[in-house]
Image (cartoon, helix red, strand yellow):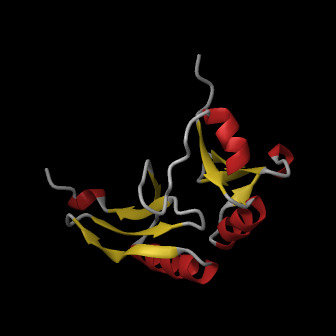
């Protein structure tokens, strides 16, 4: 029944969002793109995140769009291969114009990561998980 799952996010400006996410290393399927949306691909399996300008997104959800500057509906987590990659990506996010809301740090003794907000206030979590140190 289910062939694939993807995430849809509201954004203010497709061009600016695409530029931001390209700077931090994400790719795009440009054949699935319109003037008001784009198809972002993440990870080895090309997880799809569709970015829709708010006017288009609002037509789909037929509901109020969350103000991501004052509340969160979702935390999008992506994995990193090392602590070094976490630190490097944190700097890339800053350079691209993102906001770090949680600086790179150890968490629970087996995770290392940071949190950032993209241009539209969506919150992202980047983690290196050392499963050998996972508490039993």
What residue sits 47% from the left and 61% below the top?
124
Q: The N terminus is located in which quarter?
A: top right
Residue 29 coordinates in the image, percent (x, y): 78, 50
As rendered, which of 132 and 79 lies closer to the eye?
A: 79
* Depicted 9 relative to depicted 132: above or below: above
Residue 129 coordinates in the image, percent (x, y): 34, 60
| Residue 84 visible | yes
What residue sits 73% from the left and 61% below the top?
13
Residue that lies at the very extreme toward the front in this rendered image: 64
Residue that lies at the very extreme toward the top in this rendered image: 1
* Depicted 39 relative to depicted 27: above or below: above
What residue sits 79% from the left and 51% below the top?
36
Q: Is residue 78 left or right of residue 4?
A: left
Residue 114 coordinates in the image, percent (x, y): 39, 70
As rendered, which of 114 and 62 lies closer to the eye?
A: 62
Q: Is residue 92 left or right of residue 85?
A: right
* Depicted 60 relative to depicted 33: above or below: above
| Residue 53 visible | no
Q: Is residue 73 left or right of residue 43?
A: left
Figure quadrant of residue 12: bottom right
Residue 68 coordinates in the image, percent (x, y): 49, 58
What residue sits 22% from the left and 61% below the top?
133
Figure quadrant of residue 127: bottom left
* Depicted 36 relative to depicted 129: above or below: above
């Amino acid at each position: 029944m289910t062939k694939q799952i993807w995430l849809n996010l509201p954004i203010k400006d497709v061009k600016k969002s695409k530029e931001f996410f390209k700077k931090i290393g994400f790719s795009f399927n440009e054949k699935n793109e319109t003037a008001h949306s784009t198809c972002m691909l993440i990870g080895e399996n090309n997880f799809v995140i569709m970015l829709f300008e708010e006017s288009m997104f609002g037509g789909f959800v037929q509901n109020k769009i969350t103000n991501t500057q004052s509340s969160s509906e979702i935390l999008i987590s992506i994995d990193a291969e090392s602590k070094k990659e976490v630190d490097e990506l944190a700097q890339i996010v800053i350079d691209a114009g993102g906001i770090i809301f949680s600086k790179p740090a150890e968490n629970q003794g087996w995770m290392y990561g940071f949190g950032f907000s993209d241009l539209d206030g969506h919150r992202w979590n980047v983690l290196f998980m050392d499963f050998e140190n996972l508490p039993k």
